Amino acid sequence: MSKNTNEILSLWPKKVAELNERQLEAREGFMRGWLELLPNKYGVVEKFNQGWVAKLPLPTQKIKTLEIGAGLGEHASWEDLSNQDYYHLDYRKEFTDLLAKKFGDSQSILADIQEKVDLPAESYDRIVALHVLEHLPSLVKAVVEIVRLLKKDGFFDVVIPCEGGLAYGIARKISAQRYFEKRFKMDYIPIVKTEHVNMGYEIVRLLELFFNFETSSFFPLKVPVFTMNLCYGMRLRRRSEAELRSTFEEHPHILERIFESDLQANPSKELVDSIL
């Protein structure tokens, strides 16, 4: 088990191929267009992407929620905001400018979750990430930062695509790939390889190190097999401080992935404290 876990950890940071200027322009245009098209044309899938997380129970007391990779802010309309202070984080300034206009400057945060965000530890009761984790080349750094920002016993609500599976590959050909190639007249595969850099099973294996799984669901089939489904939703609870420290001690490769260097010594308490 330990060997397999270290093999998984060694995958990050992922090396991402460089795109030429024309490909980069097409990718950005695609992202904007796809976010607008998805809820209108692929409503059944979007109902799971947005609705499954929104229906999960929340505490009775008012909570602070952070959505990472918030995009155009579509998910907030699915949430019951009567008992939440809801914040949006994205690394694209054009998106955070739109989010600020829509929800207010204080609710919009321009930052990359793969780096340390300028916010105190344990700032949020709940963090939401919908179709975000598959995009992050430095996923270990991102997950550790999510752990840092979550309060003790906080929730992490996630939906990821079943990337790498047969059903998802077929669905892509008749949806995103068809839309991209028709609009931009170029091959979609090099683009998506720079976007979906993490496979579904890789993401799950990493999350298991930091969170306890409270509930989960596949879509569209309830059979828990990645290759037969399109999406996977998870409600995760932050592990205890003792469990997290044990994780760092058992898997020092985590620190190597965070600092992206080869650390020879065992992790010190001070080093772990600086992360958590």
Image (tube, rainbow, N blue to C red):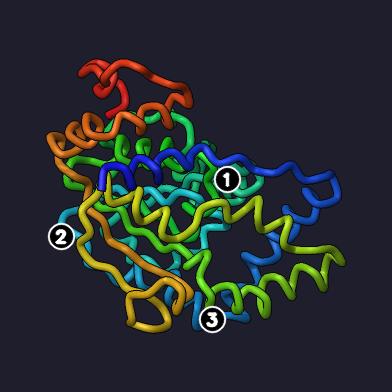
Q: CA distance from mark 3 to mark 2?
A: 30 Å
> Across the whole image, how many numbered discs are drawn on residues?
3
Residue 265 placement: quadrant = top left
Q: Which mark is residue 60?
A: 2
Question: For the C terminus, which image quadrant?
Answer: top left
Q: What SS does tag 3 mark?
A: helix
Amino acid at pointer 2: Thr
**Residue at far front of view:** 3
Q: CA distance from mark 3 to mark 1?
A: 25 Å
Q: Is residue 234 left or right of residue 43?
A: left
Amino acid at pointer 3: Gly
Q: Is residue 120 above or below residue 99?
A: above
Mark earlier in primary sequence (3, 2): 3
Mark earlier in primary sequence (3, 1): 3
Q: Is residue 151 above or below residue 175?
A: above
Q: What SS does tag 2 mark?
A: loop
Q: Which mark is residue 96?
A: 1
Reading the image, the residue beneath label 3 is: 43
Local crowd size for mark 1, using a 10 Å CA cut-off: few (<14), some (14–19), many (≥20): many
Q: What SS does tag 1 mark?
A: helix
Q: In this rendered view, identify the residue nearer to me: 236 or 12.
A: 12
Residue at 52% from the left image edge and 58% from the top image edge = 73
Amino acid at pointer 1: Thr
| Image location of residue 39, percent across then percent down | 57, 75
| Image location of residue 35, percent across then percent down | 62, 65
Residue at 40% from the left image edge and 27% from the top image edge = 256
| Image location of residue 29, percent across then percent down | 75, 57
Q: Nearer the viewer, mark 3 or mark 1?
A: 3
